């Protein structure tokens, strides 16, 4: 495997009961690159992200993240399956941002960001607070540390959710339609934060319908349909000169 690949997914399969949701999905994402996944509803985009984040177990194939095979650890020459607790720890390698921000409603913005590092990673509260404040500033919310989610707009909540994921110091960030639940006038502020993150060198996989963002920020665009990657290439290739009829229909 090429060491510069942050994500290598090889022939990933996923079934929900008898339904074949991922039919051998393979994808490589180089460190520091942004890949946008586009495609119709029900094509398996969320399922694929959830497999990378280990919210779902795969039913075939393999995923490596930063060189580590997800779900396993090496013991000498052997691969051992990880326990659920170890999988929970390994999951932290990727930060996930969802369509609905899922912040803790009873916690302030700052507390939401501090929760993972303090409770899950058992890091020192004082040190985490300094980092959380810096993250709030980074997402343009320096003045909102003590605000509760209900006091924030959707765009502000989503920016807190991005800061919360970053607080765990993930190797890569996964975004599942991060702006789909937002009022149109709030989409830009979230995309701007994501663009900034991309420019800072973060490896990102972004499921999105924002083709302008895909065109401007991504290194690669992948089109998924019915559990498969149908077409992949540069944004210009996939978005301007799509080859597959299904891609053409969608774009
Ligand atoms: P997308 O994100 O591209 O809209 P999903 O990954 O959410 O697609 O879903 C892919 C397919 O798998 C859809 O047909 C969906 O109904 C089905 N699916 C997703 N999650 C589940 C689940 N937990 N149980 C059963 N079917 C599911
Ligand atoms: Mg989805």
Image (cartoon, rainbow, N blue to C red):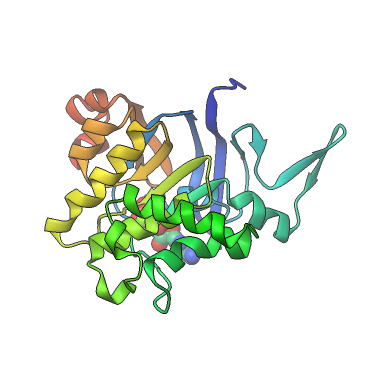
Quadrant assignment for the N terminus: top right
Tell me the residue at 28%/38% (across/down). Answer: 195
Taking the image as shown, residue 47 lies to the left or right of residue 65, namely left
Tell me the residue at 39%/72% (across/down). Answer: 108
Q: What x and y, as percent, mark residue 49?
A: 46, 49
Q: Can residue 218 be seen in this view?
A: yes
Quadrant assignment for the C terminus: top left
Tell which quarter ligand 2 is in: bottom left
209 vs 183, nearest the viewer? 183
133 vs 14, nearest the viewer? 133
136 vs 1, nearest the viewer? 136
Residue sticking out furthest to the bottom: 106
Residue 236 falls in which quadrant of the image? Answer: top left
Residue sticking out furthest to the right: 76
Residue sticking out furthest to the top: 2
Tell me the residue at 21%/45% (across/down). Answer: 210
Figure disc tally:
0
Residue 228 falls in which quadrant of the image? Answer: top left
Look at the picture and state if 245 lies above or below 113.
Answer: above
Taking the image as shown, residue 181 lies to the left or right of residue 67, namely left
Residue 86 falls in which quadrant of the image? Answer: bottom right
Q: Can residue 16 be seen in this view?
A: no
Q: What x and y, as percent, mark residue 190?
A: 25, 51
Tell me the residue at 26%/28% (across/down). Answer: 235
Q: What x and y, as percent, mark residue 123?
A: 63, 57
Q: What x and y, as percent, mark residue 203?
A: 44, 35
Taking the image as shown, residue 204 lies to the left or right of residue 152, namely right
């Amino acid at each position: 495997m090429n060491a510069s690949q942050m994500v290598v997914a090889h022939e990933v399969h996923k079934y929900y009961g008898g339904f074949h949701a991922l039919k051998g999905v393979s994808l490589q994402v180089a460190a520091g690159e942004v890949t946008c996944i586009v495609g119709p509803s029900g094509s398996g985009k969320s399922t694929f992200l959830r497999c990378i984040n280990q919210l779902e177990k795969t039913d075939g194939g393999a995923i490596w993240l930063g060189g580590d095979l997800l779900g396993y650890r090496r013991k000498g020459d052997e691969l051992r399956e990880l326990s659920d607790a170890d999988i929970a720890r390994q999951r932290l390698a990727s930060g996930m941002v969802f369509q609905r921000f899922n912040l803790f409603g009873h916690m302030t913005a700052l507390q939401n960001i501090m929760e993972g590092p303090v409770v899950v990673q058992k890091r020192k509260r004082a040190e985490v607070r300094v980092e959380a404040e810096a993250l709030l500033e980074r997402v343009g919310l320096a003045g909102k540390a003590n605000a509760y989610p209900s006091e924030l707009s959707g765009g502000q909540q989503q920016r807190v959710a991005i800061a919360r994921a970053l607080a765990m110091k993930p190797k890569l960030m996964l975004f599942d339609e991060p702006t789909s639940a937002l009022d149109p006038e709030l989409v830009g502020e979230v995309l701007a934060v994501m663009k900034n993150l991309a420019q800072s060198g973060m490896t990102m996989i972004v499921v999105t319908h924002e083709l302008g963002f895909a065109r401007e920020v991504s290194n690669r665009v992948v089109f998924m349909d019915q559990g498969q990657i149908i077409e992949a290439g540069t944004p210009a290739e996939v978005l301007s000169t799509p080859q597959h009829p299904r891609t053409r229909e969608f774009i």
